[in-house]
Image (cartoon, helix red, strand yellow):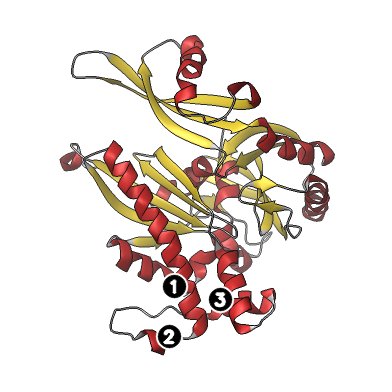
Amino acid sequence: MFAIDFGSRSIKVAKLRKVSDGYELENYGLTLSPEGAIANGEIFNPIVVAEALSELLKECGIRDNRAIIAITGQKVIVREIVLPLMEEKELMAGVMWEAPKYVPYDLDESIIDAEKVEEFVEKDGNKMMRILLVAAPKTTIQPYMEILRKARIKPKIIDIVSSANIRAFQKNLSEKKEEEQDSSIVDMILSIGASNTNLTLVENGNLKFTRDILVGGNDITKAIAKSLNLSFEEAEKLKRETKISLGKEIEEEEKNESEKIIIKILNQITKEIRKSLSYYKTQSQKVKYNQMILSGGCANIDNIKELLSEQFEIPVIIGTPLERIKVDERVFDVKRLKKLEDTLATVMGLAMRER
């Protein structure tokens, strides 16, 4: 499958081939996104993005004319809803009946889709099913379609970032043990991108909750640049070279300015994560947060996973989206791929989608 990930900092493309024990990388590439053209999942300048994408595909030698893409952002609604068990042909009618409870905008001006997650039987014997509802305004999706049209690509599937990340990190996800049947064992996937942070809660491989937090790596870089009077590029380099001190015994005055800024903005993100976790726990009483899988450009900040582990008191690991993908070392620079791995999760997860 050929996939495209439109990120605020970079546009990524990847093509995978299914093999017996996973996937094989056929091609990939990335380029910096045009400045100000993409932010928080929204496309503000489709023309320049289409030009950048076309140039990237030319450089990579990718000529596929059908692609899977992903949407994200606060306008994209993703909710798990429960409906009485019904035939597949009746599903969308049932979803549209329930949709006004969850979608805060005009349904006629939206694109709505749904997928059955699982069937279950209530205590009173009623047969029910859990449905994943996804809705987005047409105005959010139209710029993506314009880009693809200009690049002479047809959209094969429009997915969501959270689902792509779940596929990418399938090897890292937990499996519920027999003795834990009475509680929900939930993994967090935290992708800290350039303009936003995506939180995904996963149980048994199924998406249970997702939220976009409008704070990301660029906020750290801009704050460092402003505080220390540096260019964006200089501040970005300093951010990646800064090591976060651990432990409460380290005095605040002992930290350097870039470290203070990183911690301050990470605290803004973690505050919003706690709100989301508290909300989810009210919906699912017996929940145990098992681990956090970290990805995105900020995942390579020194000691970030240790800091998050301290704050949430759970193990934090860096996600490994390339673990299920065979890479021919004669064709690709494996060291470069590994260096980019934190930013490639979404595009690889998209390219793993088989239907």
Q: Are marks 2 and 3 in contact (CB under 8 Å)?
A: no
**115 horizontally vs 235: left or right:** left
- Please report the residue visible at 57 percent of the width from the left and 25 percent of the height from the top: 112
- At label 1, which amino acid type do we have? Ile
Report, in whole angstroms, how far the alpha carbon at label 2 lies from the one at label 3.
14 Å
Question: Which sits in the foreground, 246 or 104?
Answer: 104
Mark 3 and mark 1: span between their CA atoms? 11 Å
Q: Nearer the viewer, residue 302 or 26?
A: 302
In x, y percent, where is residue 94? 46, 14
Residue picked out by circle 1: 263
Judging by the rendered image, the residue that carries numbered circle 3 is: 239
Q: Earlier in the sequence, mark 2 or mark 3?
A: 3
**Which quadrant is the C terminus positioned in?**
top right
Label 1: state its secondary structure: helix
Looking at the image, residue 343 lies above or below residue 178? below
Proximity of marks 1 and 2: CB atoms separated by less than 8 Å = yes
Local secondary structure at mark 2 = loop
Residue 255: mark in rendering:
2
